[in-house]
Amino acid sequence: NAGVTQTPKFRVLKTGQSMTLLCAQDMNHEYMYWYRQDPGMGLRLIHYSVGEGTTAKGEVPDGYNVSRLKKQNFLLGLESAAPSQTSVYFCASSASGTSGPDTQYFGPGTRLTVL
Amino acid sequence: GQNIDQPTEMTATEGAIVQINCTYQTSGFNGLFWYQQHAGEAPTFLSYNVLDGLEEKGRFSSFLSRSKGYSYLLLKELQMKDSASYLCAVRDGDYKLSFGAGTTVTVRA
């Protein structure tokens, strides 16, 4: 049981390049989330998904797109990377609780630098 | 929007007790979480409070007062491995988490 995994662990992009970050979970969780973490700021929600085939915008969605074609995978795409997207990206997942999502469990993170 | 405040840094001695406070103002409330995050690693779940009162888990305890919009995390018998960032997160009426900026705790020998 690997929990939540993320690939790649590190990436350096040039401004304008595109890339996709992959998150996978093997816990059969319904909910999945993408956050970014910047120095001096809390984790901020980019996009999330409440189930296979569904996605929704979080607090800071601009410049990102997501897809949840399979229940276990949640992809985060950057179509045209900008230096402001330099950050550490965390994926998380949670099971369904009695009245909403349960505790979130996080992946190891992806460190992205945009030059 | 959400407003979650916690101190930026705290320092304590090995074996001592440290209390990390968190105050919040959110639209709706469905629980408060504490996570631990070591440098360069993922946040890991520590505790969850949804009702007022104290939840104890070994050396760690978490307290919640919903009427005051206040929580604290108490770390007892501090060990060097407790040096980390501690994140307060509130689940709002839409079941989304909002995080504070985190409190970096440094444990000194």
Image: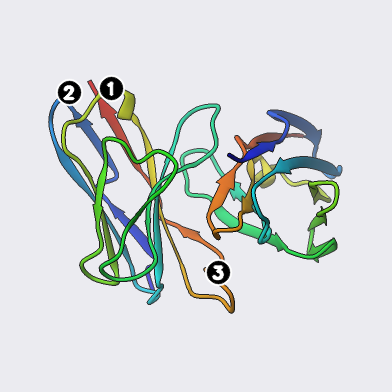
Would residue A96 be found to the left or right of residue A54 on screen?
Answer: right
Label 2, label 3: how far apart the Cα atoms are: 37 Å
Expressed as whole percent of the image width and height from the top left, the position of residue A49 reads 36, 61
Question: Which residue is drawn at the image coordinates 55% and 52% (left, top)?
Answer: B97
User: Looking at the picture, which amino acid does disc 3 mark?
Assistant: Asp
Q: Position of residue A27 (x, y in %)?
A: 40, 75
Colour theme = rainbow
* Residue that badge 2 annotates: A15
Rate crowding at label 3 as few (under 14), some (14 to 19) or many (20 or more) other CA atoms within 10 Å.
some
Marks 3/1 same chain: yes
Residue at the spot x=86%, y=42% of the render? B16
Q: Which residue is mark 1?
A: A83
Which residue type carries mark 2? Thr
Is disc 3 on the same chain as disc 2? yes
| Mark 2 secondary-structure assignment | loop
Q: Same subunit under labels 2 and 1?
A: yes
The reply to whether discs 2 and 1 touch (Cβ–Cβ < 8 Å) is yes
Q: Earlier in the sequence, mark 3 or mark 1?
A: 1
- Up the image or down, B71 lies above or below A101; here it is above
Tag 3 or tag 2, which sits nearer the N-term? 2
Circle on res. A102: 3
Q: Could you tell whether B34 is left or right of A44 in the image?
A: right
User: Pointer 1: residues within 10 angstroms few (<14), some, or many (20+)?
Assistant: some
Residue closer to the observer: B43 or B52: B52
Callout 1 amino acid: Pro
- Gap between marks 3 and 1, in whole Å? 34 Å
| Mark 1 belongs to chain | A
Q: Residues within 10 Å of mark 2 (few under 14, many from 20)?
A: some
- Foreground residue among B59 and A83: A83
Considering the image in quadrants, where does the N terminus of chain B appear?
top right
Residue A89 x %, y %: 37, 42
Rendering coords of residue B11 (x, y %): 76, 30
